Image: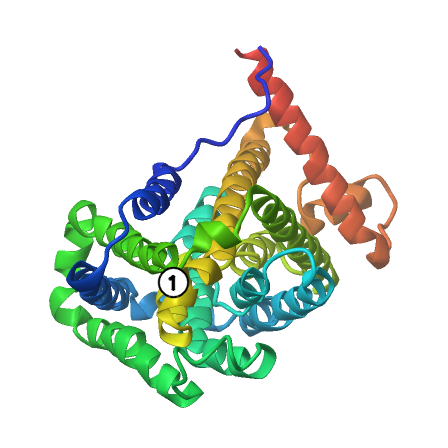
Amino acid sequence: MRRGIPIPKIDPFLVLLGGMVLAASLFPARGVAAEGFEAAANIAIMLLFFLHGAKLSREAIVDGVAKWKLHLLVLGSTYLLFPLTGLGLTAIDTHWIDPLLASGLLFLTLLPSTVQSSIAFTAIARGNVPAAVCSASLSNLLGIILTPLLVSVFMHPSSAGGGGSSTWSSVRTIVEQLLVPFLAGHLLRPWIGGFVARNKKILNPVDRSSILLVVYSAFSAAVNNGIWTRVGVADLGVLLVLCAVVLAVVMIANFGAAKAAGLSREDAVVLFFCGSKKSLVSGVPMAGALFAPAQVGMVVLPLMIFHQLQLFLCAFLAGRWGKEAAAIEAARAGASPGLPLGAAEASAAAGALGFTIPEPCMPGVVTNLELLGRHAAILASEGAT
């Protein structure tokens, strides 16, 4: 029986994010309440990065470090390709939307990659998970320093600086709130790592609740300063299109880079997911440190839209690629008996028939054999249903 095209499910977290924006729009925190929410959000973010440090195993880092070419491609996508794309679009769209929203669009392109979702999607798509752990973690650690520096270089001075404070002051705030807790958690991993691993269901909500707190606090300040008198439906539509363009450009470029670099399928999956995503977890607190409180809500609005787009599309692609990888494995396991798979088997089969496959042709032959095996496995599975 044929199945329809799989439709990715909507992450409940995306609904909660929208709920926080609505709650802040209807009931914004003011005065002492606003200060309390801001303090709670800062504590939650520090706890979040502490737990991230405790969850990251040194074995995963060691296993992934050897893939230096892959990591350079991921960092190049995150900190070169993304910013260049953002600079190009913001140079074009300055007359279409509010300048602060354009700054937010550029800001999201300067952020590090995601960690948890990049690793999760790599695992679903059957990519190189240890390399994904290393790439995503390295991107986030470097982003603590690189993102503030990139903001100071590429963004207008009046937009950055959190109410007149210097770039180095912002870097110090980020280091204190993100890097120090992360390192503390990682150093304490020998004593608390087991507890963290055993209590994932209890600790995982810290990720989302901390972001929800920050979003509510940021949008409360933005609403108090008249965000919805400046941002209309047309602005949101333009933002959606621009975010989609950024995502499409980077994804297509990463496909091409993986092919040009000769990456294996597993490593190409890592480049795609780690190199095409931006972190809401890191971006929201960084925006709070780098921008004035009244600006944070508008600055993170493009990031929230981009976050939803990347999760929706990556969930769809990861599921599809995972099924294709499973079909290839089934073919290798015998779903297509007698079909040579891999360069060694193809060369041996050709020799048995009395000819030699030229070396330049071998990659294409291997790819076509894997494609035949995949289709055979799919047809076999459909015939059994």
SS type, badge 1? helix
Quarter of the image for residue 74 reads bottom right
- Closer to the camera, 221 or 152? 221
Q: How many marks?
A: 1
Quarter of the image for residue 82 reads bottom right
Could one spot residue 126 in this view of the protein? Answer: no
Residues packed near mark 1 inside 10 Å, few (<14), some (14 to 19) or many (20 plus): many
- Residue at x-position 65% and y-position 47%: 241
Percent coordinates x, y for residue 101 in the rendering: 55, 60
- Residue at x-position 56% and y-position 46%: 236
Q: Is residue 194 above or below residue 305?
A: below
On the picture, is 185 further left or further right than 172?
Answer: left
- Closer to the camera, 24 or 170? 24
Q: Is residue 331 above or below residue 294?
A: above
> Which quarter of the figure is the N terminus placed in?
top right
Q: Is residue 10 above or below residue 247?
A: above
Percent coordinates x, y for residue 341 in the rendering: 66, 42
- Residue at x-position 54% and y-position 37%: 316
What sort of colour scheme is used for the picture?
Answer: rainbow
Percent coordinates x, y for residue 332 in the rendering: 58, 37
Percent coordinates x, y for residue 10 in the rendering: 43, 33
State the residue position of label 1: 284
Q: Amino acid at mark 1?
A: Val
- Closer to the camera, 244 or 60? 244
Could one spot residue 95 in this view of the protein? Answer: yes
On the picture, is 98 further left or further right than 280?
Answer: right
